[in-house]
Image (tube, rainbow, N blue to C red):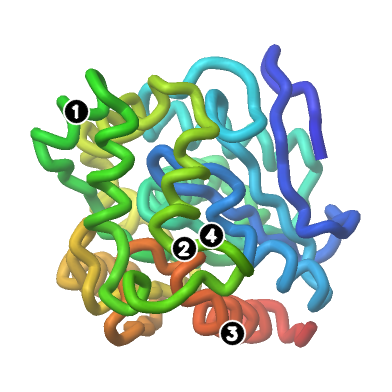
Amino acid sequence: MRIDYRGSPAHIATGGRTPDPKAPALLMLHGSGQSHVTWLLQSRWLAYHGYSVYAPDFPGHGLSGGAPLASIEEMADWTAGLVEKLKLEQVVLTGHSQGCLVALETAKNMAVRETSICKGLVLIAAGLSIPVNEALLETAKTDPQKAARMMTGWGHGQAARLHDHSQPGLSHLGFSRQLMAANDPAALGVDLAACQAYLGGTEAAAELDLPALVILAEKDRMTPVKAGRAMAAALNRSQTIEIPEAGHMLPPERPEEINRAIAGFMEQVFNFQG
């Protein structure tokens, strides 16, 4: 799906199905330097199990136009506006890494406006804040390709290095590098700086009274599992799943576990089984 939004084309993956904006929807927000491709193995599976799926590329990422947004707050405003643009009536905000910060901030803003559109959160491989290694920050500004190699090296568990990707002909590390290479070259540095600057996660979590599913990776070297546990503890109505031996790139690395967890959570929230 491609729409004109805020003066630029915005690409939104829907898993190969036409979503129903009145049905329970998953709005899937990608991480730093990523795109809708992060959710490739979730969006199609969930769409073909009866859910309305929307996986947008933020500006300057993937197939969306425009310049990368410079802060988590700007990304959250963009996301809330997209929910209105798509006329979604009941949505679960689903984020990976940076996307979790955006989901928290978006849900907080929706709660302030007393809208009941947001029905829950799925937060994958993140914490209330995401401090970024200074060397990675600097490298992302001067040599984005090297920074991407650094991130993919840190971002995968040992199993991803030993076993093939579930998509034929792909390796896990190669898959991640290719999806990051499809973005505006400045996007990764802008994203990482936005994560480094964001301090609103604790406040957002305290203000939310929504069911939340927190999915963590035992071997996460980008956002350590203890940060995810602290995020789950700060949320008022959370449940946690920890996936053994997994790394930060959970959606492509461990798709079956992620898909089952999201579907189970949607069933709880909406009493709906796809």
Q: CA distance from mark 4 to mark 3?
A: 14 Å
Q: Is residue 242 above or below residue 212?
A: below
Disc 2 crowd rating (10 Å Cα; few below 14, some 14-19, many 20+) is some
Q: 59 or 270, which lies in front?
A: 59
Helix, strand or loop status at disc 3: helix
Helix, strand or loop status at disc 1: helix
Q: Quadrant of residue 27?
A: bottom right
**Precedes in sequence: disc 2 or disc 1:** 1
In the rendered image, residue 38, in percent from the top left (x then y), is placed at 53, 54
Disc 1 crowd rating (10 Å Cα; few below 14, some 14-19, many 20+) is some
Q: What is the quadrant of the C terminus in the image?
A: bottom right
Q: CA distance from mark 2 to mark 4?
A: 25 Å
Q: Are marks 3 and 1 in contact (CB under 8 Å)?
A: no
Residue corresponding to mark 1: 139
Q: 201 or 155, which lies in front?
A: 155
Q: What is the quadrant of the N terminus in the image?
A: top right
Residue corresponding to mark 3: 260
Please name the residue shown 26% across and 65% down the image.
231
Q: Amino acid at mark 4?
A: Thr
Marks 2 and 4: which is nearer the front? 2
Q: Amino acid at mark 3?
A: Arg
Please say whether residue 82 is visible from this viewpoint. Answer: yes
Whether residue 216 sits left or right of residue 112 in the image: it is left
Marks 2 and 3: which is nearer the front? 2
Residue corresponding to mark 2: 171
Where residue 241 is drawn, which disc sits there? none
Helix, strand or loop status at disc 4: strand
Q: Is residue 108 above or below residue 217?
A: above
